[in-house]
Image: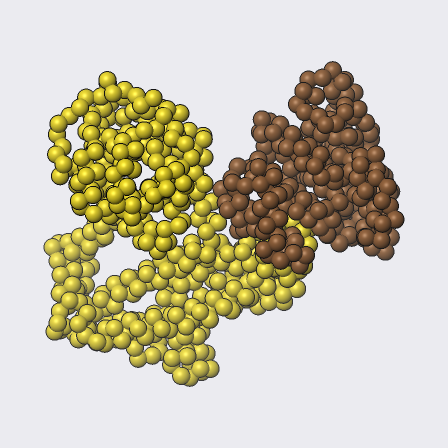
Amino acid sequence: MSAVMNRNTQPSKYGATRGAIQIKNVDKIYDPEGAAVKAVDNCTLDIPAGEICMVVGPSGCGKTTLLNAIAGFHSITSGEITLDGELLCGPGKPQAEPGSDRVVVFQNGALFPWKTNLENVAFGPIVQGKMSKKEAYEKARSLMADAGLGRSERNYPGEISSGVRRRVEIVRALMNDPAVLLLDEPYRALDSLTKSVMHESLLETYYKNKVTIFFITHDLEEAIFLGHRVVIMTSRPCRPKKILEVDIPHPRDYNALTSTRFRELMDETMDAVHEEAVKAFEAGEKEG
Amino acid sequence: MTTDNSKTGVGQGLDQAAKAALLRETMPFKTVPDATLRRIADLAKEETLPAGTRLYNEGDRADDLFVIASGKIEHALGPEAEASKLVKMVKRGDVIGWAALLSTKQRRLATTVAEADTQILRINAQKLRDLFQNDQQTGDMVMSRFATMIKEDYTLPDWLAKTRSIGEGTVARSEAEVPVSESRLALLGYRLGLWVKSPKPYLMITGFTAVLLFWHFSVDVFEWPRFRNMPGLVEVITEWLSRDPIYGLSVWTPEYYTHIIVSIRRVFIAFLLATALGVTLGLFMGWSKGVREFVFPVFETLRPVPILAWVPLAIIIFFHPESTVIFLTFLASFYATALNTMLGVDSIDESYSRAASCLGANKWQVFRHVIVPGALPFIFTGLQISVGVAWFSLVAAEMVSGEFGLGFVINTSYTMVKYPTIVIGMITLGAVGYTTSAMVRMLGDHLMQWRVRELAMGGR
């Protein structure tokens, strides 16, 4: 890792020096009981370091398969994925190793309910042996305080609202100083008001820590509001259908939502998304 | 604004002694020395609120606190309080208006409305604090008890449930600085008091009474033919408590305790073995596909074999009666624990293991930090079943083998026609069994604070 980073210290156009993901001709075929199902088909995508890349597609199209391949939860059938030039998975190595350089925030949240929020945040560096317990707790405390979560330190995740839980989970991820945050529809279960608060807080976090964000959603508005680019996926098998550059300047706040440019971008992409949604619906894909 | 003095009537009903007695019933003032309590009573002004009166609103200035003497008041906390339970009905002996004592700011956190005609005592918070200047120790104790009450009864978070201390005026002081044992004991006593005041104990007593009455009437009063040979309630109780029991076993005879202790010892050993082996096997069966495919079919084939079918083999193998009994007692508990533990591991959402490996945990760390704690709720469900099953099999085992124990008592009493002793054995078994499973439950709650708190949030 470090060797690669030293070679490539030129900041990207988003001002980040690491976290560039290259997905090259990736195929993924599931083979449950001999009936091959193609989930990802010849998918190629280049994500520069520090980009917020929003991936939109109908439910069950295979976006999560792609995320799982980057995270190292699933193998790929062919093609390759690299992070900062280093091979994550590809020929001869079908499955990446999960690692703290690519931390996932899960759809339904995966804070350990049996650990307090503080213990959850401090978990990564402690199990990796990178910090002593004391150091980890100290850093976790200060990160939580910065994120305005100091009050929930001693609570268990089950005692706080789902919005706050998501924020704690993102702090838990940042605690490891990752190159990439992989978010799998993290705000799906939240109501729209909480969602809007979450979006602003995510952007605020991003402005402070320029990490690459690979964010899966099926909410087009969310995608355009947050992303530098929005990648619209085809329904299964999944491959980029259209890539939209969102030219609304960062930092953004909620006024962006009512701007004319925002509406234009929505209009521009709506048809593409809708078309795929109809295809997926007709194919009767199971939601994933 | 302290509201509504005009709307409330001032009654003359309570004298100083009655006020002091009322204060004694409350959580914060329970342990105040008599002399101080009387002086607090002098500060307390009695008022009557007609039904529907609003005592104060959220956001009002908080100067006074109130003790309810009769009637009831709805106490609705606002969002600022971050309480986990917002609405509470307060009655005699409850104290509201405690926001006046908080270290943060003296603003009302709740809106309170009298549900019925309600009699209250109004105590000015500043005057109360002044009074404690002469006895700071008592004052700090009262304040810490307030903090505990606010946290526990009004479900406020720690950071808010801080009362101002007496000594240094406005310096915040949390109840955590008071010796923990002291405040816990006080809290336990207070909770016990609440329990006694709630309908729960009386319902429980009613349940037991109904069963006992049915027994008594069916055997001794109506003398139903089916119950002809059954010993009556009176006979059993008389025998049980007799210093000179007709059939030789009562609370006064040492053998009674020998039997109990022997049985408890057997269950204890069997239960410990079953827990150690069952949890271990269950965790590995759940965690590793290899182990499961290897062990589970064997396990599932042996599991349906009843304990009694094991008796002959057990005697042949172990020969020694004590080991035989322990083995038989162990067996069913082991199955229950292992199976529940395995299901517990299955129940863990895959995201937790994935999240842990993302955060850099290796396989063993995932096992330790995810699999074990994640399976804990199921494990404890299993252990509660297991301890019950242990008693169940113990009696079967003792009936076949052994020369002491409650199962042995029941069985020999039958062959020797000591019918009341059978029932004594049964009741004792029930009581001891109930106690052991309650202990397992308490241990579970202790180990799984996260779960207790989560369930509490769900409004259990």
Shade representing chain B? yellow
Q: Which percent across, then down, holds residue B119?
A: 20, 29
Q: Say which residue appears at 68% left-offset and 39% top-offset.
A: A184
Where B248 falls versus A97 (above or below)? below
Q: Which percent across, then down, holds residue B94?
A: 27, 37
Identify the chain drawn in brown. A
Q: Say which residue appears at 45% left-offset and 31% top-offset.
A: B80
Q: Quadrant of residue B41 in the image?
A: top left
Left/right placement of residue B180 relative to residue A28 reads: left
Where B40 falls versus B297 (above or below)? above
Where B176 falls versus B367 (above or below)? above
Quarter of the image that includes the N terminus of chain B = top left
Residue that lies at the very extreme toward the top in this rendered image: A260
Q: Which percent across, then down, holds residue B357?
A: 67, 53
Q: Say which residue appears at 17% left-offset and 52% top-offset.
A: B213
Q: Say which residue appears at 33% left-offset and 42% top-offset.
A: B166
Instruction: Tell me if I can see residue A236 in this picture.
Output: no
Where A188 falls versus B187 (above or below)? above
For this rendering, which residue is in front, B3 or B345?
B3
Q: How many marks?
A: 0
